[in-house]
Every structure is written in structure tokens, then in C-alpha cells.
Amino acid sequence: MRCTGVRRKLMAYHDGELRLAVREKITRHLEACPQCSELLDLFKKGDQAAVAVGVLEPGPEYWASFTGR
């Protein structure tokens, strides 16, 4: 996969919403691409910040309600 395709799917990857074959392709890309790996780390830090300030702990219920807000 190329960076463009990975970045389009990275949030879904982070949230565990992709089928296994796509996840595996992205995982391999992340192992070789520091830029995309850094972006994934930013998503993870965003989750940690949300927990630290008392926002609902990120999980399926939180993210399901996020799109409705």
C-alpha cells in the first residue's frame, strides 16, 4: 500500500474497523513508513489526552456516539 491509501484508512485501522487482509497490509506499511507510523501515534495520543481530561474513555460506545455529535 502507498501512503495515500494508508492515510485514508488509518483512523479505521486505529479503531479496529478494517477487515483482516486490509489491516495486515497497513501493518506492513507502518513497519516501513515512519511518517504514517507517526500519524498513527498522534491518533493514539489523542485518545490518551481524551482520557486524561476526563472525556469518556475511547471505546466502541464513545466512537459510535462521536459521529452523531
Image (cartoon, rainbow, N blue to C red):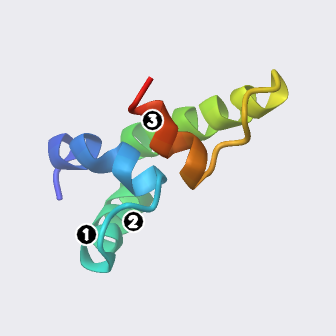
Q: Does dot 2 land on a helix, a strand or a loop?
A: helix
N-term mark: 3 or 1: 1
- How many other residues sit within 10 Å of disc 1, few (<14), some (14-19) or many (≥20)? some
Q: CA distance from mark 2 to mark 3?
A: 13 Å
- Toward the viewer: 57 or 38? 57
Three-letter amino acid code at the position of disc 1: Val
N-term mark: 1 or 2: 1
Q: Which mark is residue 39?
A: 3
Three-letter amino acid code at the position of disc 2: Thr
- How many other residues sit within 10 Å of disc 2, few (<14), some (14-19) or many (≥20)? some
**Measured along the vertical axis of the image, is residue 48 above or below residue 12?**
above
Q: Quadrant of the N terminus?
A: bottom left
Q: Which mark is residue 27?
A: 2
**Measured along the vertical axis of the image, is residue 16 above or below residue 64?**
below
- How many other residues sit within 10 Å of disc 3, few (<14), some (14-19) or many (≥20)? some
Is 61 positioned to the left or the right of 18 in the image?
right
Q: Which residue is mark 1?
A: 22
Is 51 positioned to the left or the right of 24 in the image?
right
Q: Does dot 1 land on a helix, a strand or a loop?
A: helix
* Callout count: 3
Q: Is residue 38 visible?
A: no
Three-letter amino acid code at the position of disc 3: Leu
